[in-house]
Image (cartoon, rainbow, N blue to C red):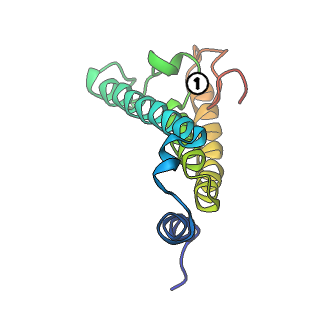
C-alpha cells in the first residue's frame, strides 16, 4: 500500500529533524526557533480554547432541534473555525521553529486540508442560521 501524503510529510519532517537538520544547542536561541515556538504555543492555546467552547456548546442545551447553534466567545467573535486557525498556527510555528522542508510540507498539507473545510463550515453556518454574524470570516480574521 502506498504511503499517504500526510505520511510522507510526516516522514520528511521526522527525517529532517532526526538526520538531515543541524540543530545544535545554539538553535534554541535562534530567532526563528523562538518565534516558531511562540507561534506554535499561541496556536495550541487557541485550538484548545476553541474546542472547549464547541464542547460546552453541545453540553449547554442551547442548540436547535438538530443539535446545532452558533458558537460565540473567544476567537469565534472573528472567525467561524478558530480551532482550524489554531492548528494552522501550530504547524506554521513548527515550520518556522524547524526551518525545514518537512515543517513547511506539513504546514502546506494542513493548510490545503483545513482552509477548504473552514470555508465549507463557514458557508454552512451562513446558510443554516439567519442571524449568523455578518462580519465573521471563515478562518483568518479580516481576510478569509
Question: Residue 53 at x, y = what percent?
Answer: 37, 25
- Relative to residue 135, is residue 16 drawn left or right? left
Q: Residue furthest front?
A: 26
Question: Residue 32 at x, y = what percent?
Answer: 60, 41
Specify the quadrant of the image occupied by residue 128. Answer: top right
Closer-to-camera residue (137/109): 109
**Circle 1 crowding by C-alpha within 10 Å: few under 14, some 14–19, many from 20:** many
What's the residue at 62%, 58% (across, down)?
100
Name the element at disc 1. Answer: loop
Q: Is residue 13 above or below residue 133?
A: below
Q: Which residue is mark 1?
A: 79
What quarter of the picture does the C terminus occupy?
A: top right
Closer-to-camera residue (66/55): 55
Closer-to-camera residue (68/4): 4
Closer-to-camera residue (141/100): 100
- Relative to residue 5, is residue 59 drawn left or right? left
Q: Is residue 129 above or below residue 113?
A: above
Q: Is residue 91 above or below residue 4?
A: above
Question: Residue 78 at x, y = what percent?
Answer: 58, 19
Question: Residue 41 at x, y = what percent?
Answer: 44, 34
Q: Is residue 102 above or below residue 98?
A: below
Please give the count of numbered marks on the rendered protein: 1
What's the residue at 50%, 86% (across, down)?
1
What's the residue at 52%, 49% (across, down)?
27
Q: Residue furthest bottom?
A: 1
What's the residue at 40%, 23% (across, down)?
64
Amino acid at each position: 500500500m502506498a504511503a499517504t501524503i500526510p505520511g510522507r510529510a510526516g516522514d520528511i519532517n521526522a527525517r529532517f529533524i532526526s538526520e538531515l537538520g543541524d540543530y545544535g544547542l545554539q538553535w534554541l536561541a535562534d530567532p526563528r526557533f523562538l518565534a516558531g515556538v511562540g507561534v506554535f504555543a499561541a496556536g495550541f492555546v487557541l485550538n484548545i480554547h476553541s474546542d472547549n467552547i464547541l464542547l460546552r456548546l453541545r453540553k449547554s442545551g442551547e442548540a436547535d432541534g438538530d443539535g446545532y447553534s452558533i458558537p460565540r466567545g473567544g476567537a469565534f467573535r472573528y472567525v467561524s473555525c478558530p480551532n482550524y486557525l489554531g492548528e494552522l498556527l501550530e504547524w506554521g510555528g513548527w515550520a518556522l521553529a524547524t526551518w525545514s522542508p518537512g515543517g513547511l510540507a506539513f504546514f502546506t498539507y494542513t493548510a490545503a486540508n483545513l482552509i477548504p473545510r473552514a470555508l465549507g463550515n463557514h458557508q454552512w453556518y451562513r446558510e443554516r442560521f439567519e442571524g449568523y454574524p455578518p462580519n465573521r470570516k471563515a478562518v483568518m480574521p479580516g481576510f478569509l
